[in-house]
């Protein structure tokens, strides 16, 4: 039997190559976060800070001061009342996640493609989409909800005729946020994450006249991930990963979430940033004859909604309180 002199997987097990692969995964993950994902997109959330010596992610919030009323006048030569600047600390306990891929020497030898490169790209995508999924599920557990059409609860969305999202519903939701004194982002807009099916309904609804496509913006705005345009003071971000409550509506209809929010609506933090790993064939004692290469990632992070108390996946010591800065609209959507 001839001796195998070709390097398995067209690589070697050197530390330099392992570092190259792990760096490649990390770069691809960052690229996905910057350019593809919506819920996990930096700028949509506020970053929490890991408190060393604990297992918590913490975020300090400074409540507004109570404004003066007409009768709160000063007295002559009298000092005004003094008030303390208060701070509220919101916290939650992150969780660890990870995934490992294995590639055999025979799979690589028989493949016309570079399986390590393909696996690196797929792993980076899985890592960032996992982050997006987890954040999406957390922020859609909140209780600040309104329903499209005539629906009054998720269970009857779809039973009252047309419960698709329309422009008038968006205008009403914006009015609710303004009435609750929820600020806009620095650009003067709220943001909304919507599903492609909801996008179709919104763009074909006659009451949505005035929808401005992103390609026609006259104001200088950096386009956000998935952005399609603006309407009624809201910039719309489309994602196929937008939350769908499958079969939860009337007659088992799917219920689609439109997550409308201002700044500081949800907090994301990690105690272990995304880390990637590569072990070349024969890189440890469990693979004595160099048959398996492994790639993987792990991370420890979580998220909470502002103003939702102990609800959510990461409840631990979550003490999040205060006025919610979001509104979730639940609707049906045209089947695509």
Image: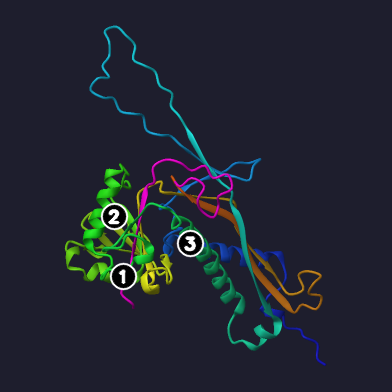
Asked if the residue at tag 3 contacts the one at tag 2, i.e. Cβ–Cβ closer than 8 Å, the answer is: no
Q: Quadrant of the C terminus?
A: bottom left
- Is 63 displayed left or right of 89 in the figure? left
- Which one is in front, 25 or 53? 53
- Counting residues from the N terminus, which is met first, the one under dot 3 or under dot 1? 3
* Mark 3, residue position: 132
Q: CA distance from mark 1 to mark 2?
A: 40 Å
Q: Residue at x 22, y 62 (%)?
A: 167
Q: Residue at x 24, y 69 (%)?
A: 203
Is residue 137 within the magenta segment? no
- Residue 307 x/y as whole percent: 43, 45
* Mark 2, residue position: 221
Give the magenta-colored segment's residue range. 308-336
Quadrant in the picture for residue 2: bottom right
Q: CA distance from mark 3 to mark 1?
A: 31 Å
Label 2, residues with CA under 10 Å away: few <14, some 14-19, many ≥20: few
**Can you see residue 220?**
no
Asked if the residue at tag 1 contacts the one at tag 3, i.e. Cβ–Cβ closer than 8 Å, the answer is: no
- Look at the magenta stretch and give its main secondary structure: loop
- Counting residues from the N terminus, which is met first, the one under dot 1 or under dot 2? 1
């Amino acid at each position: 039997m001839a001796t195998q002199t070709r390097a398995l997987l067209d690589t070697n097990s050197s530390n330099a190559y392992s570092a190259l692969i792990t760096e490649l995964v990390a770069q691809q993950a960052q690229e996905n976060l910057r350019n593809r994902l919506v819920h996990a997109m930096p700028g949509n959330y506020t970053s929490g800070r890991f408190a060393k010596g604990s297992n918590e992610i913490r975020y300090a919030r400074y409540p507004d001061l109570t404004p003066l009323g007409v009768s709160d006048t000063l007295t002559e030569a009298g000092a005004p009342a003094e008030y303390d600047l208060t701070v509220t600390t919101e916290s939650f306990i992150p969780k660890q996640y990870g995934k490992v891929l294995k590639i055999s020497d025979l799979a690589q030898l028989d493949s016309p493609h570079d399986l390590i490169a393909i696996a690196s790209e797929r792993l980076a995508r899985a890592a960032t989409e996992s982050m997006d999924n987890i954040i999406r599920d957390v922020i859609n557990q909140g209780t600040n909800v309104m329903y499209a059409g005539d629906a009054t609860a998720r269970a009857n969305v779809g039973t009252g005729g047309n419960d698709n999202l329309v422009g008038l519903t968006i205008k009403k939701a914006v009015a609710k946020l303004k009435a609750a004194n929820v600020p806009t982002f620095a650009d003067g807009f709220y943001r909304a994450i919507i599903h492609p099916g909801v996008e179709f309904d919104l763009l074909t609804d006659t009451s949505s006249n005035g929808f401005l496509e992103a390609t026609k913006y006259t104001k200088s705005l950096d386009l956000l991930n998935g952005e399609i345009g603006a309407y009624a003071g809201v910039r719309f971000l489309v994602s196929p990963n937008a939350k769908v409550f499958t079969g939860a509506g009337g007659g088992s209809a799917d219920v689609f979430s439109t997550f409308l929010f201002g700044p500081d609506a949800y907090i994301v933090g990690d105690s272990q940033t995304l880390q990637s790993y590569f072990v070349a064939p024969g890189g440890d004692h469990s693979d004595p004859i160099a048959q398996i290469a492994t790639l993987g990632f792990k991370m420890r992070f979580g998220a909470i909604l502002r103003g939702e108390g102990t609800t959510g996946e990461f409840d631990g010591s979550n003490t999040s309180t205060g006025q919610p800065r979001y509104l979730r609209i639940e609707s049906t959507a045209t089947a695509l």
